[in-house]
Image (cartoon, grey):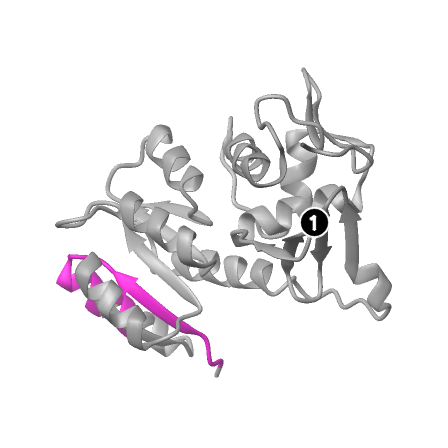
Amino acid sequence: MNNKHILVVDDDAGLRELLQQYLSEQGYRVDAVADGSAMERYLAEQAVDLIILDLMLPGEDGLTLARKLRMRGSQPIIMLSARGEDIDRIIGLEVGADDYLAKPFNPRELLARIRSVLRRREGGDTKTENPARDMFRFGPFSLDLHSRSLSREGAEVVLTAGEFNLLRVFVEHPNQVLSRDSLMDKLKGYERTPFDRSIDVRVTRLRRKIEGDPSTPVYVRTVWGEGYLFVPGNKAG
């Protein structure tokens, strides 16, 4: 039995009931609401470890709600959608979702995604015994692997679980060109499909938070035809 708390936000009553029953049987504490307004009321009273958020909701849609959630905090988000086009998946990831699953889906696949996202949030099974190795500094930024936090001159920079894990890979492999396939392999538990471009989306989101001018990055550089290069010695404006 684990103590992870999941909130399902979906207007399909049958799916809410199915997910509550199935995920509860897997040891999670699960609650469910039908729309964004109910979600906001729930989150005002309860903390959750992960949100399963439908894209197509009455009132504010899932993309709008994901943007709001990202502005306030960093709870992991898995987005669901009956529309499985690549553009929907990319937009969902761009606004802050940690993973995306197209309907209809096998509940076991969703369970695997939940475990993967929560594992990435917790930093996997690797433990570091040397506190000095838990802290990386570049420019005005400090990345604390133990607390999974990023700060700029003492001010917190809110990262999603996906952004944190991508930045962790970069700081652990400085001044090395990393291909997209290499990055995907290093992000444990990451789900991918052929021609998956979501790494590019995550890099774009990360640049917005650490670069002085994301259009001319100095930390996370693109090496055309090869991948990305993290250069910690540079200073963003």
Q: Amino acid at mark 1?
A: Arg
Vertically, is 83 above or below 146? above
Tag count in the figure? 1
Which quarter of the figure has residue 7? bottom left
Asked if residue 66 lies in the magenta stretch, the reply is no
Query: Is residue 58 or residue 89 the one in the foreground?
Result: 58
Where disc 1 sits, the SS reads helix
Q: Position of residue 189 (x, y in %)?
A: 58, 52
Q: Position of residue 204 (x, y in %)?
A: 54, 32
Vertically, is 155 above or below 207? below
Q: Position of residue 25 (x, y in %)?
A: 36, 78
Q: Position of residue 68 (x, y in %)?
A: 34, 51
Residue drawn at the location 26% of the way across and 71% of the way down:
42
Residue drawn at the location 69% of the way across and 45% of the way down:
186
Asked if residue 14 lies in the magenta stretch, the reply is yes
Give the quarter of the figure containing the C terminus: top right
Query: Which residue, given by chain and number where applicable, does mark 1 sit on?
Result: 168
Which quarter of the figure has residue 23? bottom left
Q: Which residue is situated farthest in the top direction here?
A: 225
Left or right: 60 in relation to 208: left
Left or right: 72 in relation to 121: left
Label 1 packing within 10 angstroms: few (<14), some (14-19), many (20+): some
Residue drawn at the location 29% of the way across and 64% of the way down:
8
Vertically, is 197 above or below 174? above
Q: Which residues are magenta?
A: 2-21
Vertically, is 196 above or below 3? above
